[in-house]
Structure formats: structure tokens, C-alpha cells
Amino acid sequence: MDAIQFRRFTYLVSDVDISSLTISKETKERLEIAGIYQFEIYQKENNYFILVDTKIAYDSYVVHKICSELGIKLPSFSFEEEPLERIYEFEQQSVYKAKDGQLKTTVAPYKRFVWTLLLQEDPELMAEYKRVHSMGQAWPEVTANMKTVGVKDMEIYLSGTQAILIMDTVPNFDLEKIGPKWQQLPRETEWQEYVAKFQRTNPESSIQEKWQDMTLITSK
């Protein structure tokens, strides 16, 4: 399959129950025609993470306009005004503003994981967390480890102190089997010990215990 470029917009809705939001077959077809390739909603308790992939020419204004026209509306929420900040991208080469969308290239076929984690409510720690995940700051050993275990793409987005991680892997990726081996790779333990100070989790917990699964409840 040839690689295709697209734009990604992400959102977190925490004050509105959207678990009943459904997208009909007709709406899916109209989204496709309008240039929205993927519309996914993931849930963890009362948090809803929305992922929208579109044509590369689109910005958040266009996403909002298309969703509104097709009846995909949420109370007190704007697809134009509230896209999330991305602080990490696997082997990132460029930086894009949230409202412009993140320029990405398809990595299909893949198996997708979406996880969430709370960070410390400390401005200095938050600033450092963003810095160590910014372009060119990733530890090369940690990036190499991800490639070794079968990670094809990874991103981290922030909504306040809530982090959301998207990880696309090879289709046969088995986290239960690979997780323990992953943690034994070069500098992996050192990295986990380092980032523990940013996280509202037990430092002794495994990666799988720290990052909580978000469940896909609808998709395009």
C-alpha cells in the first residue's frame, strides 16, 4: 500500500456524555466524500478522546464546518477552537500548530492503542515534560527500542495535565508478551524512572499499569 499524507486533529471532551453519539452509514459516506477519512471516539470513564483524520489541505475551521453540516455537534464544544496540543511524535521532523492539524503519513496496516495518564499539576514539571518530548529530544535508545518491538508510530497529546498517547504497531503486536521484554531493552528502565516524576502514578508500576486504556466506541 502506498503511503498517503493526511492531517490529524484530536480533542478531549470531559464534561459532556457523548457515549451515545452514533454515526450512521450515510454520515460515514458523507464524511468520506467531504474529505474526513477517519472519525474515532475513545472513552475512559467520563473522558472522550476524538481523533479526526482529514485531507492535508484542511484546518480546524474546515473540520468544524463539515461536522456541523453533517449534524456532528456537541454542547459547548467547537471542533475549530479546541484541538489538542501535540508534544511528541515518533521521529518528528516538523512542528505544526494544533489548529493547522498534524501532517502525518499512513502506516497501515496497524494495530492501534490509545492510552491516557494524568501528569503532576506543577507548571515547572509540565514545562520540562513538554521539553523532553519535543522534537530532537527523544532518547535515541528509546526510539530504537520502539522500532525493535514493532511500534510504527506514536504520538502524545495534552489537555491540561491529561496526556493521551496514540500508538500504532505491527498488526500482530501482543502487549502482554512484548511489554516485559520491552522494559528490559537498553535505557528503558532509566527512562521510566526519569519520567515517573511527571506522572501521577506509582513509580513502581509497569508501563501498562501507568497508561490506562481508552476504549474505541465509534469509528469511521
Image (cartoon, grey):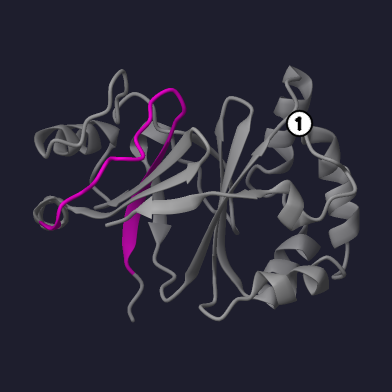
* Relative side of 21 to 51, left or right: left
Image x and y of residue 59, in percent: 27, 38
Q: Nearer the viewer, residue 51 or 142?
A: 51
Residue positioned 84% across, 41% down in the render: 196
Image x and y of residue 108, in percent: 41, 73
188 to 101, vertically: above or below: below
Which contiguous range is marked in magenta?
A: 4-25
Q: Nearer the viewer, residue 149 or 96?
A: 149
Image x and y of residue 65, in percent: 16, 32
49 to 76, vertically: above or below: below
* Relative side of 75 to 89, left or right: left
Q: Residues within 10 Å of mark 1 (few under 14, many from 20)?
A: few
**Which image quarter holds the N terminus?**
bottom left
Image x and y of residue 140, in percent: 76, 61
Q: Is residue 101 magenta?
A: no
Q: Element at badge 1?
A: helix
Q: Is residue 10 magenta?
A: yes
Tell me how many marks there are: 1
Residue positioned 77% across, 33% down in the render: 200
219 to 1, vertically: above or below: above
Residue positioned 15% across, 39% down in the render: 66
Residue that badge 1 annotates: 128
Q: Nearer the viewer, residue 117 or 99?
A: 117
Amino acid under disc 1 = Glu
Residue positioned 39% across, 66% down in the render: 106
**Which image quarter holds the C terminus?**
bottom left
* Relative side of 129 to 68, left or right: right
* Relative side of 31 to 19, left or right: left
